[in-house]
Structures are given as C-alpha cells and as structure tokens.
Image: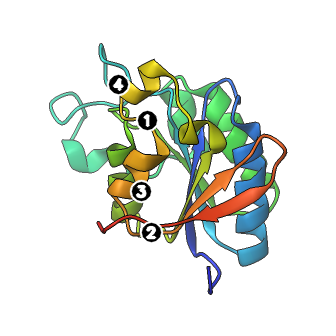
C-alpha cells in the first residue's frame, strides 16, 4: 500500500479469537492515525438481526448508525466488541464497531465500500476455510471477488501480508 489508510475495517469476533487481527489493526490505525471499525463477524445470525430493522427502530432506519459507539454496542448486548472498541479508543484511536446482519465476504466488502475504507484486515483463516465457512461465503476469495480495496491478511504469529485486490466494488 503506497499511502497510509484513513479508514480500516478489521474482522473481529465477540470471543476475541481474532485477537491478532485486532492487535494489528490497532497498530496500523495508531501509526497512520486512521479511523478503525471492528467488524463483528459473529453478529450475523440466520434467526435474528443484530440491530433494529427499519420497522423496529424508533424514528426509522436513519436512527440506526452505520458505525456503533461503545454505548451502542453495549445496548445491543455486544460487550465483548464494546471492550475491544474501548481498548482502541484508550490507545488514542477513533474507533467504532459494526454488527453485520449477514455473513459473507460480499457483506464485508460492501460495508467497507460504504464506509470508504481503504484497508480491510482479515484473519489468515479465510485463506483456507472449513466447509461451513465456504458455504457461508466467508473466504478470502469471496472478499477479494467483491472489492478493489487493499486487503491485509493477518497470520497467527501477527505477521501482516498484503494480498491482491479483486475486480472492483
């Protein structure tokens, strides 16, 4: 990446199993003074949306923010993600969370596009996903296919590897 990112969307989880991605994203955001959005991959469920829908939110869909504060995350019952966002804020980073309504690399890529992110950070697990993740389209190939944004793959040892980008958003 030739310039520093200004907005980073980083893959995370409620149980913090992607701690290395979160740590690398915090380091990158701190170094480049970028806004960080932690994307809670566990929020999506086939049974319920993590946020109020247009008919359930007081005042309509415009009342549901596209970046969630620590308080928003706590109200949504996502204390684990709220703690991760607070950790980034405590390190001087403008940080938020997001609770996607659907799983998949295309959903991640679309959210990054909407937020004008110039870097997406994902775990190396997406390079060789299991059968369930493949069925849910939670693969690096799926993210790459749906975005032209730079993607950083974070390995279990914390090493960050930039990978090619897809055909476009």
Q: Nearer the viewer, residue 128 or 57?
A: 128
Q: Secondary structure at mark 3?
A: helix
Query: What residue would you read off at disc 3?
Result: 144
- Disc 3 or 1, which lies upstream in sequence? 1
Q: Residue at x 70, y 46 (%)?
A: 21
The answer to whether residue 37 is visible is yes
Q: Position of residue 81 (x, y in %)?
A: 62, 34
**What's the residue at 56%, 42% (across, down)?**
127
Of the two numbered discs 3 and 2 on the same chain, state the one appearing first in sequence.
3
C-alpha gap between disc 1 and disc 2 = 17 Å
- Residues at marks 3 and 1, CA–CA distance in whole angstroms: 11 Å
- Of callouts 3 and 4, the N-terminal one: 4
Q: Percent from the top left, x then y, of residue 46?
A: 30, 17
Disc 2 and disc 4 in contact, CB within 8 angstroms: no
Q: What label sits on residue 149 in the rendered view?
A: 2
Q: In the image as oriented, which residue stretches furthest toward the left?
A: 55
Residue annotated with mark 4: 135
Q: Is residue 33 above or below residue 154?
A: below
**Label ID, residue 138:** 1
Q: Is residue 162 above or below residue 141?
A: below
Task: Bin the neighbour count of mark 2 within 10 Å (Cα to Cα): few under 14, some 14-19, many 20 and up.
Answer: many
Label 3 vs label 4: CA separation?
Answer: 16 Å
The Cα–Cα distance between marks 4 and 1, rounded to whole angstroms, is 8 Å
Marks 3 and 4 in Cβ contact (< 8 Å): no
| Residue 164 image point, x, y percent | 51, 66
Foreground pick, 60 / 40: 40
83 with respect to 3 (left or right)? right
x, y percent for residue 33: 70, 75
Q: Are marks 3 and 2 in contact (CB under 8 Å)?
A: no
């Amino acid at each position: 990446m030739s310039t520093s990112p200004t907005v980073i969307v980083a893959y995370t989880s409620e149980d913090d199993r992607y701690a290395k991605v979160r740590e690398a994203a915090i380091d990158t955001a701190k170094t480049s003074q970028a806004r960080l959005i932690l994307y809670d991959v566990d929020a999506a469920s086939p049974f319920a949306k993590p946020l109020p829908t247009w008919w359930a939110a007081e005042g309509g869909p415009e009342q549901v923010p596209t970046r969630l504060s620590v308080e928003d995350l706590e109200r949504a019952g996502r204390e684990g993600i709220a703690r991760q966002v607070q950790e980034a804020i405590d390190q001087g980073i403008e940080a938020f969370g997001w609770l996607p309504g659907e799983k998949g690399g295309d959903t991640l890529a679309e959210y990054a596009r909407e937020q004008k992110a110039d870097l997406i950070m994902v775990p190396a697990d997406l390079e060789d996903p299991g059968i369930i993740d493949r069925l849910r389209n939670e693969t690096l190939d799926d993210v790459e296919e749906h975005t032209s944004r730079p993607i950083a793959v974070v390995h279990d040892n914390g090493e960050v590897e930039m990978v090619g980008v897809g055909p476009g958003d």
